[in-house]
Image (spheres, rainbow, N blue to C red):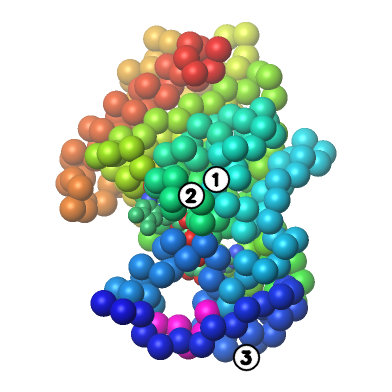
């Protein structure tokens, strides 16, 4: 199928984008990399009156380290994140997970902000943002709003973003030498969306771990921190028990890739691998 008819508006500045949001309201959609939006238009899953192209707004792109926070601009391409030395050094979880986002051709155009705005429950970057306790920066004519990633994702392709707001960037706390992280994904082929995945961070202590933020994705309607995992202190002898408890606490969606029971079994296996990573051994040591 072909996309429905729409107007194209090239925004040269944030103000031009905000003016379009005011004029068109819910009838206007942001165009970033177009890697999710264009297929949705072609399948008539979205029928906006106007696409507001934010690619010309140069200040929305780039990666900066400031006050121990890594700022990634909304239109930074996945491939720039993948190739960034700053990301590799300060956010190894993202550096690892970004390689699982689609195929290189799609990563060349797709953007970090677009991935978060699209909020696919099987996408890697929303899960990593929640595991890293990141903050999204949303701007509109009314000013700036900062929203924790854990509060931003509301459901399947549903977020806390208002239609007059632009995601301008995301702030992610740089990881310390005592921080542990883990990423695992099960997909049919490398580059496909996850059947199930796990992104996790924690702080290593002399005995066990603290502050465990373990996020299972591709399973429930949105990525969220496992409360069960966060409430337990972890040592090596508890791994199997905790993995079972985390998996039992999930509410998996059945989809074409598997039923809820299968997803729970897959998630349990990945959670166990992640907990073992966090406690030491590859890839954290
Ligand atoms: C074959 C294929 C495989 C893929 N596999 C994966 C995968 O394995 N993992 C994965 O995570 N993704 C995957 N993707 C999606 C890809 O990562 C997209 O890049 C991403 O989901 C959307 O980014 P985009 O910049 O292309 O956004 P667009 O397609 O331009 O926009 C997506 C949505 O977000 C909104 N939007 C975009 N930017 C902003 C902003 N700054 N502020 C407010 N709203 C905004 C748009 O209005 C639209 O509703 C795949 C895509 C394809 C086509």
Mark with earlier residue (1, 3): 3
Residue 29 x/y as whole percent: 52, 77
Q: CA distance from mark 3 to mark 2?
A: 32 Å
Please indicate, yes or no, whether residue 197 appears anywhere in the rendered image. yes
Q: Residue furthest right?
A: 67
Determine whether the residue tagged by mark 3 lies in a helix, strand or loop.
helix
Q: Main secondary structure of the magenta part?
A: loop
**Dot 1 crowding, Cα within 10 Å, few <14, some 14–19, many 20+:** many
Which residue corresponds to mark 3?
23
Mark with earlier residue (2, 1): 1
Say above or below: 219 vs 87. Answer: below
Which residue is found at the position 69% from the left and 38% from the top?
173
Mark 3 near ligand 1 (CB under 8 Å)? no
Which quarter of the rendered picture does the N terminus lie within?
Answer: bottom left
Residue 134 vs residue 40: left or right?
right
Which quarter of the rendered picture does the C terminus lie within?
Answer: top right
Front residue of this view, candidates 189 and 266:
189
Displayed quadrant of residue 73: bottom right
> Label 1 near label 2: C-beta < 8 Å?
yes
Is residue 107 one of those drawn in magenta? no
Which residue corresponds to mark 2?
107
Residue 149 x/y as whole percent: 58, 51
Displayed quadrant of residue 85: top right
Which residue is found at the position 54% from the left and 18% from the top?
284
Which residue corresponds to mark 1?
79
Mark 2 near ligand 1 (CB under 8 Å)? yes
Determine whether the residue tagged by mark 1 lies in a helix, strand or loop.
helix
Displayed quadrant of residue 13: bottom right
**Dot 2 crowding, Cα within 10 Å, few <14, some 14–19, many 20+:** many
């Amino acid at each position: 199928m072909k996309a429905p008819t729409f107007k194209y508006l090239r925004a040269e500045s944030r103000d031009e984008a905000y003016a379009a949001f005011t004029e068109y309201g819910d009838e206007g959609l942001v165009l970033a990399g177009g890697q999710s939006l264009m297929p949705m238009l072609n399948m008539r899953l979205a029928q906006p009156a106007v696409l507001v192209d934010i690619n010309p707004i140069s200040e929305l792109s780039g990666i900066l380290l400031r006050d121990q926070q890594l700022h990634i601009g909304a239109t930074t391409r996945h491939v720039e994140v993948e190739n960034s030395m700053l990301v590799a050094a300060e956010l190894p979880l993202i550096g690892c997970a970004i390689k699982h986002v689609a195929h290189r051709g799609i990563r060349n155009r797709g953007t970090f902000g677009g991935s978060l705005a699209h909020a696919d429950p099987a996408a890697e970057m929303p899960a990593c943002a929640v595991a890293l306790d990141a903050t999204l920066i949303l701007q509109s004519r009314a000013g700036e709003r900062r929203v924790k990633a854990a509060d931003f994702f509301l459901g399947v392709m549903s977020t806390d973003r208002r239609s007059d707001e632009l995601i301008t960037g995301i702030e992610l706390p740089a990881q310390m030498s005592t921080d542990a992280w883990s990423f695992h994904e099960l997909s049919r082929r490398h580059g496909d969306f996850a059947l199930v995945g796990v992104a996790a961070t924690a702080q290593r202590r002399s005995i066990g771990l603290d502050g465990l933020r373990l996020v299972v994705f591709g399973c429930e309607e949105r990525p969220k921190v496992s409360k069960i995992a966060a409430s337990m202190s972890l040592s090596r002898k508890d791994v199997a028990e905790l993995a079972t408890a985390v998996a039992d606490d999930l509410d998996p969606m059945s989809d074409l890739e598997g039923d809820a029971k299968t997803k729970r079994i897959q998630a349990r296996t990945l959670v166990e691998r992640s907990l073992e990573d966090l406690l030491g051994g590859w890839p954290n040591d």
